[in-house]
Image (spheres, rainbow, N blue to C red):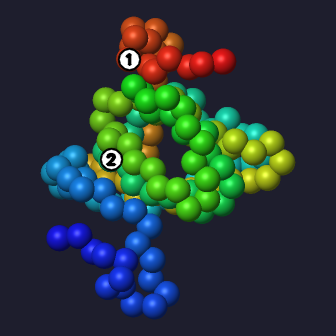
């Protein structure tokens, strides 16, 4: 069932909807809500993956966001994001602003006790290079 914006009470805003998202949640997963604050120009974490799907939105500033198989894009405050987790590499989650902090809030669904992220090594990055979207310069 889809919630329509007009059926929400005053002061409540539907930010984003992701049909089929529950199909990606690992059995027995816990929900983790995480706030990431990036200093001006912060490149974010190195290439990594998450143990489960991540759904959230940018609360402040701009984030340069890139997942394996997708071209890099700039997400601005109010924009939603999704990544499937699992085997997909998260290449970039950088602050796109050189002079202001940026922030995002996400909810991750992951098996209890798993790390929030696992950094991907150089050898694996090289082996999966063909899966990365071409970057135009």
| Residue identifier under label 1 | 131
Q: Residue furthest right?
A: 99
Of residues 95 and 108, the one nearer the viewer is 95
**Residue at x 54%, y 32% (from the top left corner):** 72
Question: Whole-Å distance between the Cαs marked 1 and 2?
Answer: 19 Å
Quadrant holding the C terminus = top right
Q: Is residue 48 above or below residue 7?
A: above
Give the mark nearer the N terminus: 1 vs 2: 2
Of residues 28 and 15, the one nearer the viewer is 15
| Residue identifier under label 2 | 53
Where residue 59 sits in the image (x, y, percent)?
Answer: 60, 62
Q: Which quarter of the picture shows residue 132?
A: top left
Q: Secondary structure at mark 2?
A: loop
Q: Which quarter of the picture shows residue 46?
A: top right
Q: Which quarter of the picture shows residue 83?
A: top left
Where residue 136 sits in the image (x, y, percent)?
Answer: 60, 19
Where residue 5 sits in the image (x, y, percent)?
Answer: 37, 77
In this figure, what is the number of numbered marks?
2
């Amino acid at each position: 069932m889809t919630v329509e914006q007009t059926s929400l009470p005053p002061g409540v805003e539907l930010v984003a909807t992701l049909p089929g998202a529950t199909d990606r949640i690992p059995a027995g997963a816990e929900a983790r809500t995480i706030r990431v604050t990036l200093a001006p120009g912060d490149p974010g974490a190195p290439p990594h993956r998450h143990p489960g799907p991540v759904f959230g939105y940018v609360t402040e500033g701009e984030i340069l966001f890139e997942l394996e198989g997708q071209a890099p894009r700039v997400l601005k405050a109010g924009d939603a994001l999704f990544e499937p987790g699992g085997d997909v590499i998260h290449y970039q989650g950088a602050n796109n602003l050189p002079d202001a902090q940026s922030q995002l809030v996400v909810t991750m669904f992951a098996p209890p006790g798993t790390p929030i992220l696992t950094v991907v090594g150089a050898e694996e990055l090289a082996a999966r290079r063909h899966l990365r979207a071409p970057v135009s310069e």
